[in-house]
Amino acid sequence: MYLEKSPMTSPSTAFSAKYIFDSNNLLTNMAVLVQDNIILDIIPLDKITDKMQIRDYGNSIITPGFID
């Protein structure tokens, strides 16, 4: 489960693409949730809220396991 935004932090950003590779699985219909340059979670697209910024990279693969 992802962390809620506290008043002292920046808004969460959801990074989405056709695929997300988490070092083990190739996921679809998911987004990487980032806040203050820290990966918080990988969440289903339908869990993205209006309070989150969204960056969609279309027909790409995001590999957060190689970053964090």
Image (cartoon, rainbow, N blue to C red):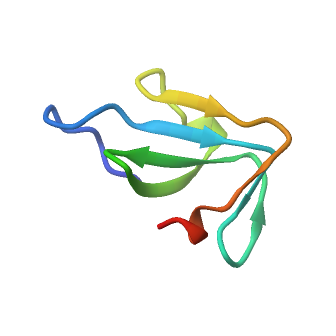
Does 57 sit left or right of 12 as displayed? right
Q: Position of residue 29 (x, y in %)?
A: 75, 46
Quadrant containing the N terminus is bottom left
**Among all residues in the image, which is located at the extreme bottom?**
24
Q: Position of residue 18 (x, y in %)?
A: 81, 45
Q: Is residue 1 visible?
A: no
Q: Is residue 30 above or below residue 50?
A: below
Q: Nearer the viewer, residue 50 or 18?
A: 18
Q: Residue at x 47, y 67 (%)?
A: 68
Residue 22 screen position, x and y as percent? 65, 69
Residue most extreme to the top: 50
Q: Compare residues 63 and 47 and report the one nearer the observer.
A: 63
Left of 21 or right of it: where is 33? left
**Residue 21 shows in the view:** yes
**Residue 41 horizontal/vertical position (percent):** 48, 57
Q: State which quadrant residue 47 falls in.
A: top right
Residues 47 and 55: in front is 55
- The quarter holding residue 38 reads bottom left
- The correct choice, above or below, for 68 with respect to 56 in the image is below
Residue placed furthest toward the left: 8
**Which quadrant holds residue 27?**
bottom right
Above or below, 40 relative to 17: below
- Disc tally is 0
Name the residue rendered at 86%, 41% in the picture: 59
At a point 49% along the width and 47% down the height, the residue shown is: 33
Is 12 on the left-hand or right-hand side of 63? left
Q: Residue furthest front?
A: 67
